Image: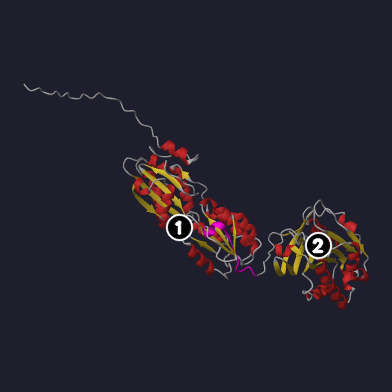
Amino acid sequence: MAGLFSIGIRGLLDELLFMQAPGLYWLNVDRQYDAMLLSRQAIGAQADHAKVALLCAGGRALDVADGLGEGGPSRLPLFSLPDSEAAIVSLTEDLMRTLKPRGYLLILLTPLSLWQRLSEPLLRRWLTDTHGWLAQQGCTLMVIAHGAGGTALHTALLSRHRTLYGLGRLHSLQDSCLYQVDFWCNQAGVSARQQMKLTRAREEGWRVVPDSPQQPQPRNDEHQVLAELAALEDMPAPTELWRLFDGADALCDEGLKARTATLVFVLERGSAIEALAQRIHRLRQQRGNGLKLVVRELSACLRRIDERLLLTCGANLVVPHHAPLSRFLTLLDSIQGQVFARHLPADIGTLIDSMRPLRLKGVVSLERFQGALHDLMANPLLPEDGKGLLVSLCPVAGIRPGQVLTLCRMQRDGDLATVVGDRVFLFLFACAINELELTLGRIFRLSAAELFSHRVVWHQDRHVLEQLQGLNSRPGSTGGWAVHTDAGSLAETAETLSHPPRIRPEPSAIRLPVFRKEENA
């Protein structure tokens, strides 16, 4: 990233990870070994073409460079300084004589005691002069001071926020480190008062413990709208604050840099719901409660439990497919300034499994049909009387149930079909009664009014269970059209059902009367 240098700690948000050019950043570290490891990690995180120089006071820069891995810049100038006040005071002048520092990342590794020997006026003057020099040269200086007992120095540096771009501290714990950021400024914004736990891996170096919280700080992207291109129905962006993206992946990547902006995803098919829920959960978990996440349904594919899943995963608003563009824009305005206040589950996999318990769809045997529905009705995580619809369909005269199944397309997990006698039974998972006509229109290739003479619907749990118990006693429930396969495609199963065994009729002779025309005498 041009103009930005990473400090190398994996798992940090961008506003805490990068240092801008020009800039003066300061980190106090308890142990020398941890400071050397952090220096190596910062060097290794830079690109091959980056300009980086390592300066060590009171030690050899070569000792630090010897532990570098394969990554990092192709060229690394090394400088060793004496542990003296004069070396620090004349640092910028020496660099101008020995190095062309423009565009460089300068990593200065020093003992904490060196800075403690400087008087407070001299420290203030050094910070001010160095800040101006860095601005002139367009380079970045990262000071890593190692040693115990730096509380007084750290307190003095807290008031130098006008010259320092970032101030942090790395405390050593028994098996990990505590990373405290007092303030940090870069092109992604300003963050303050952050604290997280770091763990050390031999090959990867320092990284943030996954459960360690990071709270993005508010910034001036509150009125910005990031949306998929299809959300506006080929209309131009309403204002210059809108940014449009070709797909959900590009939008999600940009959303990981936002803090309080509005993100608009589109949903056109039911098979994309889980992937969208995972994106929303990731954004909410990593970017905090200030982000406003919106889903616009472009075609009728969401059921009630799908909306609950998206909202539970972190969405602020789900706009239905029948809402026109003007209504959609009004709803966007209504959530501005909103902060997500609901509980966010940590494990999205468990959440999806609890809301989508049936990994089964299509034509199944009566026994499998009953067993799946009994398990579903006993699931305590699903809403009472909201688990779905049981529908009994009677085909019109001249159409057999097996023929109806050849016109049936079930694409959602939990939507099941079976045949009992002369009836087709459907279970539509998480489908509301007012969605029945629309759902039947998606499932059958022909109009339901043309295929069925009448139908009966049950939606309450106890009524569904009563009908399941009575299916075995229905005429023809154990033979004829009963399905005996649980696997295979719906088309193959339906084709088998549409050709039941039958007796070939025997031909019989028919004698027709002979009529003769009588002639006139």
> Is residue 258 in sight in this rendering?
yes
Question: Considering depth in this image, is 184 or 329 the residue closer to the camera?
Answer: 329
Q: Does dot 1 land on a helix, a strand or a loop?
A: loop
- Amino acid at dot 1: Gly
Would you place residue 406 above or below residue 208 in this image? above
Q: Quadrant of the C terminus?
A: top left
The type of colouring in the image is secondary structure
Does 291 appear in magenta?
no
Q: Quadrant of the N terminus?
A: bottom right
Q: Residue furthest left?
A: 521
Quadrant in the rendering for residue 19 = bottom right
| Residue 194 relative to residue 442: left or right | right
Q: Please tell me how crowded label 1 is: few (under 14), some (14-19), or many (20+) other residues with Cα within 10 Å.
A: some
Q: Does dot 2 land on a helix, a strand or a loop?
A: loop
| Residue 513 relative to residue 440: left or right | left
Would you place residue 321 above or below residue 402 in this image? below
Q: Earlier in the sequence, mark 1 or mark 2?
A: 2
User: How far from the left and from the top, in percent, is residue 228?
Assistant: 57, 58
> Is residue 380 in sight in this rendering?
no
Q: How many marks?
A: 2
Question: Magenta segment, which residues?
Answer: 220-233
Residue depicted at 86% across the width and 77% down the height: 120
